[in-house]
Amino acid sequence: MKKYLIIISLLIAVAIGAYFFLFGKKDVCKNVIPEDAKAVLVIDAKQALKQMDFSISDIFKALKHRQQQKEEDKAGWGIDMLAPMYGFVSADNYVCGVFALSNAEDFEEKLKVEDIAVESQRGFKWASKGEILLCFDSKKALAMGPVIRGGADAMRGKMVEWMKQGSHDVPVLSSLKKDDGVISLRSSLAVVPQALTSQITDNIKDINLNDIFLNASLKVKEKSFLLSTELESEDEKFANYASECDKLFRPIDGKKLPVCMEDPVFRVILNVNGEDVLPKLRENIVVRTMLVGLNLCIDLDMMIKSIDGDVLFEYGGRSASSSTVVASAQIKNQDFLKNAKDWCSGSPSFGYSCHALGDKDFVLQNARDKYFFGVHDDFLYVSSDNGKTLHFSAPQLEKNISLVREQSQGKRIYVSLDFAKVLHYVYGAPMQLDKGITSLDHINVGVTDLRHIQYELTTKEKTTDFIKGLLK
């Protein structure tokens, strides 16, 4: 018995030692980040291992693998993948990355193997590739870009200064949200690509993007990767704009969602008041022209104004050439039906004519297209398929409906996209694709409010197995 206790104690001691060898490493890179950095990105592999249920047996395997690497002639890049890595944007808009080295000699040798010349200067080793300038010592490496050849000397002085810095405060790093993200980001919107900020700059006059910060964090769940983003600002104009958006898009109720498709290619859910939405639609000249034309045929404005609650868009079908689109919107009244006889008896307008299929079901058509619409229970529906064939909340969809309600309730906008079906739509017939791609399931976007948005990538298998498959 005593013998077994000794063995167990040794195993526990080794496991604890292995854990601290892998996870208890000193951060040698943080002090390189300059005080006036505009953005900072942190990659923490330790969090990834923890969130992926990295077991004690996996620790022993990792230790064995590291030992084997040391014994091999080609030891690899010599980069410490378990130490925190940082990316940052400097005050003068240079994009930089800093990472720890487990073996600087291996790192230098690998650069030479890749035909990248290494020289010594100012107490550091230097290398360059294209517009990337690299500086490293025995513990860490700093990469900067884009650096043009003529400006390299000036940048070397700056990089040396950063590499020699001691402990100091970096406001953008200090403000980084501590939420155990595998990848965490804090950045001024001024350095974010314009394509991602145009929604704000187009709607808020003279807004200073330096006063708005983006916080983002990527976490690894059991069967998904979850990216959470937050916009943070004390700017009054931004606060007013955020408040207006939150009034326009209300929290989704989800209790009566009339789900019609079991597995659509994509699904969009939101909650609005039509009387608030109609003026916004009219601001777009193309939409406004369409509304004017269709109102000559049917009372479209009255229909939109009657909307008060959840709105659901679904798109599906066997292929892009035989697809079905369904839109359903909860309504507070059916007053627009009072003039339905006029729709069907009037002359065609804007190329469209309207015909009755029943008391509450109609078809709007032109020479090529047909759009079925009408009222089902408390919902107004529009479909590219015959409305009478739609299975509104049919019993076979009950499980699907419950899941949709669970995912969307409380959010202001919810979007779900079936990754496999999108590939089928894009490429047509099934084709040979990388296993990693075929293992992806859905992309879901949930907007809690303008400031808080989550992006979820789900997998058909556990994320641990998914990542292991990618590394094979």
Image: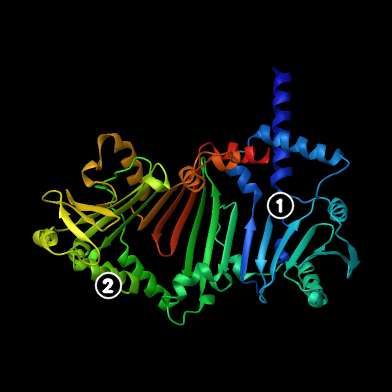
Which residue is under mark 1?
83
- The colour scheme of the drawn protein is rainbow
Q: Nearer the viewer, residue 55 or 199?
A: 199
Q: Quadrant of the N terminus?
A: top right
How would you rate the neighbour count of disc 2 (Cα within 10 Å): few for under 14, some for 14-19, many for 20 or more? few
Q: Quadrant of the rendered structure where residue 250 is?
A: bottom left
| Dot 1 amino acid type | Ala
Q: Residue furthest top?
A: 1
Q: Quadrant of the rendered structure where residue 466 is?
A: top right
Q: Earlier in the sequence, mark 1 or mark 2?
A: 1
Q: Is residue 4 left or right of residue 301?
A: right
Rounded to the nearest angstrom, the CA distance separating label 1 from label 2 is: 53 Å
Q: Nearer the viewer, residue 160 or 388?
A: 388
Residue 358 % position (x, y)? 12, 48
Residue 203 % position (x, y)? 41, 75
Q: Quadrant of the C terminus?
A: top right
Which residue is under mark 2?
279
Q: Is residue 442 left or right of residue 317?
A: right
Residue 307 % position (x, y)? 22, 60
Residue located 86% across and 39% down the image: 72
Residue located 32% across and 57% down the image: 270
